[in-house]
Amino acid sequence: MLIASTFRPPWWLANPHAQTLWPVLCRRRPRPALRRERLTLPDGDHLDLDWTGGTQGPQVLLLHGLEGSSGSHYARGLLAACVARRWRGVVMHFRGCSGMPNRLARGYSAGDTADLAHVAQLLHQREPATPLAVVGYSLGGNALLKWLGEAGSSAPVQAAVAVSVPFLLDSAARRMGRGLSRLYQHHLLHALRRSYRAKFQQRADGPVTLDELAQLRDFYAFDDRVTAPLHGYAGVDDYYARASCRPYLRHIAVPTLILHAHDDPFMLPEAIPDPAELSACTHLELSGGGGHVGFVGGRWPWRAEYWLEQRIPAFLAEQWSSRSTATASARASAPAQCSADR
């Protein structure tokens, strides 16, 4: 279902680049107390979870974007919102993103859903009666939607939200090579090369040498020479085709909200899916403005409001409330399934 968003960019932050950069550069980030848990994965590698406090209450699993972490502005904001509602927030760091390189040569990619499936199942097994939702941003949102489509009705979560999703990775790579968006590409590639050097400076199983790494100056080149071979793809075209989430949207069987802005400077408007591509469980909420993981509102700059931290918890609370009502009336422990295919 396609629905119009209630978000409207304020007069002082109408530009999509300003929306994107404001929370990164100007926001005083919340600092909720976090504890770290290290998980050993089935292949012998590891990843880290950062948890807010508490031992009871619904759980919200956060997936960060490219080279993000629990320190990213959007993660800190939503974690603080979870604490305020007495929910438990937990950030799943993709491999190598928690401040320490992971053990294996492989890292993470936009289509990497096995680790998410493992973590979600683990959280559900630990507390099968506790409401569980997943929220993914940008690359993490792509992985989330792809996983939901793959899992269908077997996904062990009651709700999901994806924010500023690339949908089609090829389209996103082309957009990042144009105009001012090249600045974002430069920044993210710098971070990717830094992470690569930190891992492969003392080991010889990297797909490119450090000298070759310096010559990879756009996403097409980096994904073709590094991401694709490390994660089992034949090349960049194979990676972008198989890892993009858009073909999986019609198979989602969990109540899911996708929040997206038409002016997102990380992707082209053509990447936005048509309503016919969405399952009956999926709501695509589009706003005219908002940038990339921005959605900053408020009447004045000194009273900025972060709309995502209102909209996302409101949606999750609504889904959990609906599930409780349905469970009580049906005397069943599982939520009613919505139809995944039309």
Image: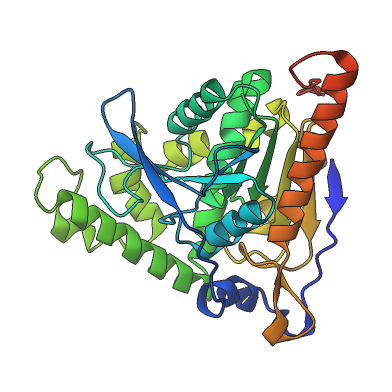
Q: Is residue 65 visible?
A: yes
| Residue at 65%, 23% in the rendered image | 129
Judge whether 333 appears above or below 47 on screen: above
Answer above or below: position of 98 versus 275: below
Residue 172 x/y as whole percent: 55, 55
**Which quadrant: the C terminus?**
top right
158 horizontally vs 191: left or right = right
- At a point 36% along the width and 51% down the height, the residue shown is 97
Image quadrant in which you'd find residue 311: bottom right
- Quarter holding the N terminus is top right
Position of residue 340 in the picture relative to residue 244 (left or right): right
Q: Nearer the viewer, residue 236 or 252?
A: 252
Q: Residue furthest front?
A: 55
Q: Is residue 305 above or below residue 46?
A: below
| Place of residue 91 in the rendered image (x, y in percent of width and height, measured from the top left) | 49, 47
Q: Is residue 336 left or right of residue 125?
A: right
Q: What colour scheme has been applied to the protein in the rendered image?
A: rainbow
**Residue 164, can we see it?**
no
Q: Residue furthest right?
A: 329
Q: Position of residue 34 (x, y in %)?
A: 45, 53
Quadrant housing residue 68: bottom left
Seen at 43% across and 55% down, the residue is 69
The number of numbered discs placed on residues in the rendered structure image is 0
**Residue 85 place in picture, x, y as percent:** 69, 51
